[in-house]
Image (cartoon, rainbow, N blue to C red):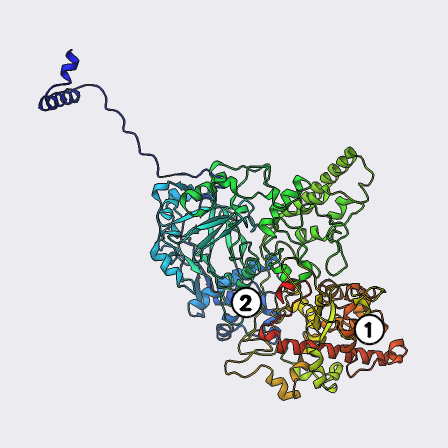
Amino acid sequence: MRMARSLLVPRESLCVVVLAVSLLGACSDDPEPTPQPAPPSCKETRSNERIPVLPAAARQAYQETFTNLAARVNSECGSCHQSPNNLGGLSYTATRDDLKDKGPRMLVRIQRGEMPPVASADQLKKAVELGVQLSAWLEQGSPEGSFTVNGSQGATVEDPIASGVASAMTDLGNCTPAEDKLGSDPDKDAYFEGLTQLPRFLSETDTDVTTFDAEKLARHGTFAFAPTYPLFSDHAKKLRLVHVPQGKSIAYDAATKKFKVPPNTRFYKTFFKDVTGTDGVVRYRKIETRLIVTRERWQDAVFGTYVWNEEGTVAELHRETYRDGSTFADRVLTYKKDERTGATRNYAIPARHRCVNCHTGSEGQNFVLGFTPLQLNRRAPGEGGVDPAATILEDELSQVDRLIKYGVITGLGSAADLPKLETSAEGRAPSSKEELELQGYFIGNCAQCHNPRGFAVQSNQALAFMDFSAGGILFGWKPFNVLETNGRRRYVAEVEDFGVDLGRPYPTSTLYERVARDTNERNIHMPLNVPGKDCRASLLVARWIATLDWPKADEGLTAEEKAAAKKKRMRLANGAVVNDCNTDADVRWVGEDFTDKLPYQPRNPGWKEHVGKGAWEYLTRYPITEAHEQLAKKRFPTNWWDLKPGLCTFPTASAPSPVEAWMTDRRGVPKRPWGELYYSTAGANVFQGICANCHGRAGDGQSGAAKALVAWQGARVANLTSAQYGLFGRAASGASHLAPFEQEYGPHGAARYLVWMADGGTNVPLTEEFMQAWVKYGEVDIDFSNDTKDWEAWGANMLGAASGACDLIRRGVFATAVPPSGNIRAIGGTSLWTEICTLDNPLTDEIRSGSDATAVAEWLKRAQFNAGVMAYFYLRDELSQGRVAPLRSECDRR
């Protein structure tokens, strides 16, 4: 009853009682309870990829003298450019005034990685160090005496990254923001929406982006992510950020299994390189931050990279220029890798055109790589092609669910709804875990080029079958004896001694050679456009080859015997790669610049001294008539369209006249409906079958052969169709670049110059091996010998291929596969090439028999001249107007 009453005391009495209790408590000797801290709003990120960031610091300056600089310029550049040497049109004297005048041009070439040409890694390092001194000397007014290099010592250095953020950094940021701490940045969204050019400094982009502070970034709607299958970049570590505009999201389409990225979304990727400090601790220096701003059309994406200064305080937009003055060319720099020893390492920043090469093949056609459903769906070790030895922590595995909660991604309930690599090829499963691991590597490093929209396929349609994207060719592929598109070597070959073959300079399996060897005259090192050598790629390819069913060696074996044979090959693969592949001591990088200086100048300025003279006297002797122009535009049925069910339909058509034997069966019935006949013009056939192998299908100098040539010899393939500096462009005044040649040689004078360049006027020594490797059959109905001795006779130059095709016409074996013919699929091109070769050039019995060697040589010379003129008209009237003729594999592009 006492308790009950106490509950019924008046309110005033209750207050007194409470107050009394409070006072009594205040006088008590009991300790106060310890206050509990509020739960953190940004928990430390649980990721195995730790990136402790190197603190910002002043650079140590040193003094240099002009005398020493001049001596170093002479040592590095003198053999090619010190007067009287004048290689590439650049000559200097080691005087102050002349170096002040020529120095800026030399500096640009050095910084792009173009000087010295085809440099070794050590030569590249010395050139970059020279560039640093030359730049400092020029910036300080080119003094006669001493000048300061790398001077910021004693200056105030403000680190944009807080020490706690730097020490806790991972590939998913320094911490994981709580959902109640999220925000947006409408002002920056509006700023980026109308942007056509990136601002000068990274600090002017999204709010707090230079702080790398995940909590601050989350308040403005910017979040970290990391892909399952990353791109190799000389072992750099990376922090990737995504910012979706306010009110928008990246929507998942369950039907297509793709993301729809809204316009104005920003993707950042910062590259870090390891540096060993004086205390022996490894930390990571910020090198560059790349930025992509998406647009409705991927072609309109705004992109660039910001280079961090050596102090680590400011990142400025990279604006190294190409020859034509446009920005974002290749850049090579060095950084101190070990502060104890002073050891440095080269670092290469890929140019704009390299970015375009890779990003145009993005899965979502949005110019973004690495942010796809497959890439975001992080997998546990041993799952989905992930290395079984990898360590994957909680925040890595939960990244998709976290981005859903943040509102970045919509359209799915959880990561469980996303596609998985192992089931990406409907009806086909990986034949082994090694095949699955290799496919995972291909996703991050190869598929951006090797897919129907990628650079590899766009530059050579014959590679369309080699689709390395998810669901592509790899699962269940039987690659043995599949020939490269030049018909000479095999992607994967069965050999007697597998381990020994992998260690050879030219391994028999070219798929392995491409990842394990540097670029040479017949192969490009893969992955393309990235620095450094990835021994993991070599190991994955070698192990995959080992686990395939070898047609001869494994034939008739029991399951147990076959397993034992594969196990043995795996040991050989492991041993060979360990012995054969070592991480490069330094990065070798050859700059690419396929542009030219403005105003336009012919690529070989000595053309007047050669065209129509000496070995090229025929160039002005043969007339170019209206018949040439008509033939260049004449359409010939040369094959059947490759069918693409669901994409292409064909009209009803009448039979062509004449109906050729290859079109019908023995009864005279057409093999396919007449509407499915593929037609090509003579001009398109010559250009796409010969010239495009180096100059690219659009005539813009973008091709695999062009990349191989510059890496192998330092030679540049011309961009023929550029409106600013191409042969078929115009000056700022409106004057045609063709005018000087027409003034010299009359109408179509540029055709004579073009034929001269293609017949040896380039001054680039093209070997028979190079021509064999890169002048391919592809998807064009052309035929020529694949015998090296024939190339020696025809000439290892571009028009040597035309001479070869016409030589087969002369012998009557074009497209018959009777040696030296090699392309039986080109049977329909016989009529086309017969007309090209015989235009104003009769094919007499004497020529056919070859009884008069001099007459045959003259006939072939005129035949190749005709072919060159065909290409000229196609370039002038089609490619320079942006019209690229579809190949027979491109019925959907008609």
Mark 2 vs mark 1: which is more N-terminal?
2
- Write down the residue under mark 2: 109
- Residue 807's x, y, as percent? 82, 73
Q: In the displayed structure, would residue 354 be above or below residue 55? A: below
How many numbered callouts?
A: 2
- Residue 334's x, y, as percent? 52, 56
Residue closer to the observer: 536 or 668: 668
Q: Is residue 766 left or right of residue 707?
A: right
Query: Which residue corresponds to the image point at 71% horizontal and 82% vertical from the top-left?
Result: 628
Query: Which residue corresponds to the image point at 68% horizontal and 69% vertical from the top-left?
Result: 688
- Residue 257's x, y, as percent? 54, 48
Q: Residue furthest top?
A: 1
Q: Is residue 532 visible?
A: yes
Query: Which residue corresponds to the image point at 39% horizontal and 63% vertical from the top-left?
Result: 194
Q: In the displayed structure, would residue 603 be above or below residue 170? A: below
Q: In the displayed structure, would residue 396 be above or below residue 731? A: above
Q: Is mark 2 on a helix, strand or loop?
A: helix
In the rendered structure, which amino acid carries the disc numbered 2? Arg
Q: Report, in whole angstroms, how far the alpha carbon at label 2 lies from the one at label 1.
A: 46 Å
For the C terminus, the image quarter is bottom right
Q: Of tags 2 and 1, which is closer to the observer?
A: 1
Q: Is residue 756 left or right of residue 83?
A: right
**Alpha-carbon neighbours of circle 2 within 10 Å: few (<14), some, or many (≥20)?**
many
Q: Is residue 338 visible?
A: no
Residue closer to the observer: 747 or 626: 626
- Write down the residue under mark 1: 809
